[in-house]
Image (cartoon, rainbow, N blue to C red):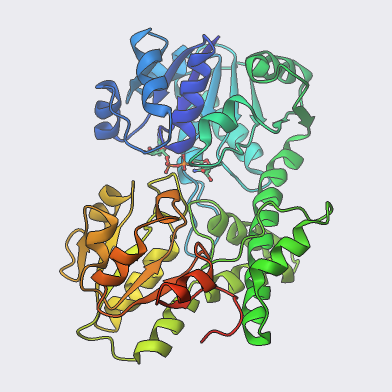
């Protein structure tokens, strides 16, 4: 089948590559000329495990092409996927300018029936706006072509995106027309083989399902972080509580890890957008508001703890920081807790020596001009002559480092573990002053 994907970011690239890998003929369109040039050379501008090889293979086979030419993209695909960014606007609402720009482009260039598929995360009612935008452009050209608009939200996780796409838990198809439902089913058939994972529903329900899912996941994290703060004050260990809680199958072990807050390109903006939608419809979403504010507070916990240990003025201090990405196995630093911690440390006069297995280029792009940040080549350089080690992301490589080397490199053997990577008793036995999250008595 012929497929066009607008937007070559985390979602667009994975979607396009996986459809091509199933034998489809895919064109990816992006307005970022530099990104497209990179992709045309076979260079993948993001870190996503397995994507490099899969993308190059399909590109070499001629099933996957990249262009800035929107008209070419619209002429190519029966399916026109919109996978562009929907960042938070200043008021917390989802900024739909890119989505609607693509819709207008499709209306300007289409010359035959098209299925317009909204894969970006968008508020309920956006499909109507996309439909209207395409229709207005067609009317302006005096054309009367048929088209359908489908909501097909994406649930992939950065770091496991390919696996999630080819073996999805569910494929949500929101459509008000049985014809498009069947076409979408055929397109997704290669990823829907062992049992039917396709869930068909109306468009508005599909749009809401995506926000509902992310809001639920964010709620689980904020709930655990709330309890973690409480556990600390009560002299309980949240990690033992977590294990006890998760054993109830109604609760389960997934996604109940306490930490230094959620980040990334999705949870923060999606919780805010859903909250904004609720307000627009005159509803006070008290739980959603708390999820967001608990998270904002949680990102400050490490900062407060650092000040409690070292005092308010951190001038002359240096901190080793491990983990810049918002979670392991990605280079994405959008809304990452590491950024809140580093910015607070700089504000208090400290220097930071940071290391991340994949996000160093991204850190250079964001903070490259700062004199008070040193981006280190490996984890041990980051702790050399530092006053403490701060762990912000639970990369696997951080789990069993050479602790003696770390202790000898640090000016003082102090570890602030924002992800509960290390057992407190072991750290104490190794001679560290150790601060975890919600692990009994802490400051
Ligand atoms: P991204 O920022 O990585 O990529 C978006 C791309 O769209 C950029 O390359 C940008 O240049 C391009 N673009 C913008 N306007 C364009 C236009 N008019 N025509 C063509 N390209 C254009 O975004 P992302 O992380 O891939 O997210 C895309 C959407 O998918 C968002 O709505 C997001 O909420 C949703 N989503 C993201 C994830 C994730 O893990 N990143 C998961 C599920 C859903």
For residue 310, which quarter of the picture?
bottom left
Closer to us: 337 or 4: 337
Closer to us: 197 or 144: 197
From this view, report whether residue 92 is shown above or below residue 237.
Answer: above
Q: Is residue 285 visible?
A: no
Q: Is residue 211 visible?
A: yes
Q: What residue appears at the point 46 percent right and 22 percent down from the top-left corner?
A: 17
Q: What residue appears at the point 41 percent right and 23 percent down from the top-left corner?
A: 28
Q: Is 243 displayed left or right of 362 in the figure?
A: right
Closer to us: 327 or 238: 238
Residue 196 placed where, x, y %?
78, 22
Q: Quadrant of the N terminus?
A: top right
Residue 261 placed where, x, y %?
53, 66
Residue 46 placed where, x, y %?
36, 38
Q: What residue appears at the point 50 percent right and 78 percent down from the top-left corner?
A: 301
Q: Is 137 displayed left or right of 282 in the figure?
A: left
Q: What residue appears at the point 72 percent right and 39 percent down from the top-left corner?
A: 206
Q: Is 211 displayed left or right of 1 in the figure?
A: right
For residue 405, which quarter of the picture?
bottom left
For residue 149, which quarter of the picture?
top right
State the residue lying farthest toward the front. Answer: 429
């Amino acid at each position: 089948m012929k497929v066009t994907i607008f937007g070559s970011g985390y979602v667009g690239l994975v979607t396009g590559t996986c459809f091509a890998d199933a034998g489809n003929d895919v064109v990816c369109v992006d307005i970022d000329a530099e990104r497209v040039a990179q992709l045309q050379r076979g260079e993948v501008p993001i870190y996503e495990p397995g994507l490099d090889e899969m993308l190059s293979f399909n590109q070499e086979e001629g099933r996957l092409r990249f262009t800035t030419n929107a008209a070419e993209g619209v002429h190519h695909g029966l399916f026109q996927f919109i996978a562009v960014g929907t960042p938070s606007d200043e008021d917390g609402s989802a900024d739909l300018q890119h989505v609607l720009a693509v819709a207008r482009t499709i209306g300007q260039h289409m010359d035959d029936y098209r299925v317009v598929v909204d894969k970006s995360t968008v508020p309920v009612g956006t499909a109507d706006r996309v439909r209207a935008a395409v229709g207005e452009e067609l009317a302006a050209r005096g054309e009367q072509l048929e088209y359908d608009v489908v909501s097909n939200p994406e649930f992939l996780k950065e770091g496991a995106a390919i696996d999630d796409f080819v073996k999805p838990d569910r494929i949500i198809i929101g459509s008000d027309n049985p014809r498009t439902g069947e076409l979408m089913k055929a397109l997704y058939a290669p990823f829907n083989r062992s049992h039917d994972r396709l869930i068909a529903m109306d468009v508005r329900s599909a749009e809401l399902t995506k926000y509902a899912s992310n809001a639920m996941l964010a709620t689980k994290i904020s709930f655990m972080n709330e309890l973690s703060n409480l556990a600390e004050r009560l002299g309980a260990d949240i990690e033992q509580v977590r294990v006890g809680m998760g054993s109830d199958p109604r609760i389960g072990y997934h996604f109940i890890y306490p930490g230094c807050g959620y980040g990334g390109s999705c949870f923060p903006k999606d919780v805010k957008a859903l909250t904004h939608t609720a307000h627009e419809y005159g509803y006070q979403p008290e739980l959603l508001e708390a999820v967001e504010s608990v998270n904002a507070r949680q990102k400050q916990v490490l900062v407060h703890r650092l000040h409690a240990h070292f005092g308010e003025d951190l001038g002359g201090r240096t901190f080793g920081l491990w983990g810049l990405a918002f979670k392991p196995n990605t280079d994405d630093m959008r809304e990452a807790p590491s950024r809140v911690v580093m910015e607070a440390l700089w504000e208090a006069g400290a220097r930071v020596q940071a290391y991340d297995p994949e996000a160093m280029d991204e850190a250079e792009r964001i903070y490259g001009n700062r004199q008070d940040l040193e981006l280190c080549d490996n984890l041990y350089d980051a702790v050399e002559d530092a006053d403490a080690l701060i762990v912000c992301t639970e990369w696997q490589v951080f789990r069993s480092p050479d602790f003696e080397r770390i202790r000898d490199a640090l000016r003082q053997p102090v570890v602030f573990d924002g992800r509960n990577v290390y057992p407190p008793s072991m750290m104490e036995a190794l001679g560290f002053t150790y601060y975890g999250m919600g692990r009994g008595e802490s400051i």
